[in-house]
């Protein structure tokens, strides 16, 4: 028996356990295609089978949570019609479902006709036999054909996307959708022109980098200005969207723009988040690098466009503020080593630059890098060690220690972590963070600030960075990359210093060169 065509959506879907109301369902989006997997096939002797209970093969079975839409079943047995009842799982050859409350179906019971329904529409009809049954759950095997799960998924997915599009047209203002379409057209047009240039390649290979830099600078001066302005207009327009419309808008904007923006390695990583979170160490390195990457000339151009978003420039400029604070800490007179904590250190680019340009030190230096990402630690430690041993031949008295801690562990440490914090995070001359506070709610940020303040030695300095909302960057981060930040004002940053004990000798705001990264700048009193 062949499956019937996918049904049209109905306003009264059958109930099923753990089903979410329509308003709380995750909005589907159309992510860009992933790059093709490697075509290299293992040889036969490299293939492994399963172990344990897995050695018995079972065909693919979709649980209720994995089903593309609520599915129910109904049947006729002994001249009585039963159902519809929720399907709990489904395979090509059988089903599991909630059993009827008023009857027990023993194994061998024939259900004929048997129907599967998706939101009141029949999607498969045939006959089935009960394999096991109770009032709570029955399981059955199809007798007159199989269910094409791929067809089922495809039909439900397409129907879901069409329903999403209908809601987007209804809820998103036409002028807002038109503005997103205008941005897409801008990207399409510049891609066409750049690919034409690439096809007519006449660059001198020895001067390609310089020629590309000149080309990109010229394009940013004309096309780029219009592009950043278009994003700024969308940022302003989006402020009028309610929560549901904003969620629909994010899905719409990502599906419209990301297929083009994926040519840029920075924007692709921001969208895909391969480490599970945005703003990872590699993304930061892509903001700083002078070697542009991407898919062809257009991808490299988009990389340059991304590096010139205001907040991307702030990521680079805020490192200069930290480097100046580091120089100040290293220049102070005193006894013992200078102890510095980099909180959420990431790739530690500011430390790499500082050590590369340092010729001598008055005092030994202890660098403590705290981050929850092992890959970030690996990268930072490798680069710092290479500078200290390869560049300075081990002559600089600097030690590097990496602590694999999260903010939660820092605020509420378990017993082993408490000892590590007591031993390592004490009597610090400088504690700094450039990007962590962009993700911390006010309550957590205030608690962490108080904790860090207690870890300073007398006269020590706390430098905590936070980005500010910036139209040309904030919209694309939030609506296209799904990378929302917590932006703060001067007043919000200063509130984090309220009630610090002991009362700071100094508390103020320091800005980077772009003015888009605020640093809460606190000095602990020197009681000597």
Image (spheres, rainbow, N blue to C red):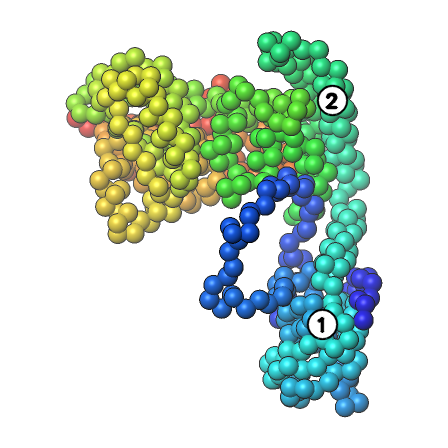
Looking at marks 1 and 2 on the same chain, the residue that comes earlier in the sequence is marked by 1
Q: Position of residue 502 (x, y in %)?
A: 26, 36
Compared with 359, 44 (above or below) is below
Q: Position of residue 32 (x, y in %)?
A: 68, 41
Q: Secondary structure at mark 2?
A: helix
Q: Position of residue 161 (x, y in %)?
A: 75, 51
**Which quadrant is home to the C terminus?**
top left
Compared with 83, 401 (above or below) is above
Mark 1 crowd level (few <14, some 14–19, many ≥20, 10 Å Cα): many
Q: Which residue is mark 2?
A: 195
Instruction: Please say whether residue 187 is visible from this viewpoint.
Output: yes
Residue 72 got which mark?
1
Give the Cα separation between the discs numbered 1 and 2: 51 Å
Q: Looking at the image, which is closer to me, 193 or 317?
A: 193
Compared with 377, 296 (above or below) is above
Q: Residue at x 75, y 87 (%)?
A: 77
Rendering quarter of residue 519? top left
**Which quadrant is home to the N terminus?**
bottom right
């Amino acid at each position: 028996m062949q499956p019937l065509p996918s049904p049209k959506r109905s306003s009264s879907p059958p109930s099923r356990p753990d089903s979410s109301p329509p308003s709380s369902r995750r909005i589907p989006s159309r992510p860009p295609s992933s790059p093709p997997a490697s075509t290299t096939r293992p040889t036969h002797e490299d293939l492994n089978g399963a172990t344990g209970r897995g050695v018995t093969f079972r065909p693919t079975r979709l649980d209720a949570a994995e089903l593309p839409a609520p599915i129910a079943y109904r049947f006729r047995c002994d001249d009585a019609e039963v159902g519809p009842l929720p399907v709990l799982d489904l395979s090509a050859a059988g089903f599991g479902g909630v059993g009827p409350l008023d009857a027990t179906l023993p194994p061998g019971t024939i259900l004929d006709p048997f129907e599967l329904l998706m939101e009141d529409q029949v999607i498969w009809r045939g006959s089935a036999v009960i394999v096991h049954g109770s009032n709570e759950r029955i399981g059955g095997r199809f007798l007159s054909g199989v269910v094409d799960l791929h067809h089922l998924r495809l039909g439900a997915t397409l129907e879901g996307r069409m329903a999403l599009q209908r809601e987007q047209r209804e809820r998103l203002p036409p002028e807002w959708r038109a503005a997103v379409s205008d941005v897409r057209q801008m990207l399409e047009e510049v891609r066409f022109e750049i690919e034409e240039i690439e096809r007519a390649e006449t660059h001198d290979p020895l001067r390609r980098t310089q020629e590309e830099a000149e080309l990109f600078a010229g394009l940013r001066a004309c096309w780029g200005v219009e592009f950043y302005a278009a994003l700024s207009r969308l940022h302003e327009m989006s402020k009028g969207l309610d929560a549901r419309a904003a969620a629909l808008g994010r899905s719409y904007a990502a599906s419209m723009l990301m297929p083009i923006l994926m040519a840029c390695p920075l924007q692709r990583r921001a969208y895909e988040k391969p480490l599970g979170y945005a703003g990872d160490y590699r993304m930061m390195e892509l903001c700083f690098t002078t070697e542009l990457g991407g898919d062809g000339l257009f991808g490299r151009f988009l990389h340059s466009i991304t590096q010139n978003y205001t907040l991307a420039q702030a990521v680079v400029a805020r490192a200069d503020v930290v480097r100046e604070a580091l120089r100040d800490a290293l220049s102070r007179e005193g006894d013992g080593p200078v102890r510095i904590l980099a909180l959420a250190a990431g790739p530690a680019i500011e430390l790499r630059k500082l050590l590369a340009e340092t010729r001598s030190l008055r005092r030994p230096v202890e660098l403590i890098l705290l981050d929850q990402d092992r890959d970030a630690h690996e990268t930072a430690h490798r680069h710092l060690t290479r500078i200290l041993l390869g560049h300075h031949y081990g002559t600089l008295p600097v030690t590097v220690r990496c602590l694999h801690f999260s903010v939660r562990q820092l605020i509420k440490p378990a017993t082993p972590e408490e000892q590590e914090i007591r031993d390592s995070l004490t009597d610090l001359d400088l504690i700094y963070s450039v990007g962590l506070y962009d993700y911390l709610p006010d309550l957590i940020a205030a608690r962490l600030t108080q904790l860090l303040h207690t870890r300073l030695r007398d006269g020590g300095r706390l430098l905590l960075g936070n980005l500010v909302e910036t139209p040309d960057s904030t919209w694309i981060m939030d609506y296209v990359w799904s990378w929302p930040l917590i932006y703060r004002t001067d007043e919000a940053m200063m509130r984090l210093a309220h009630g610090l004990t002991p009362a700071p000798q100094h508390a103020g705001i320091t800005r980077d060169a772009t003015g888009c990264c605020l640093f809460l700048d606190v000095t602990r009193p020197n009681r000597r």
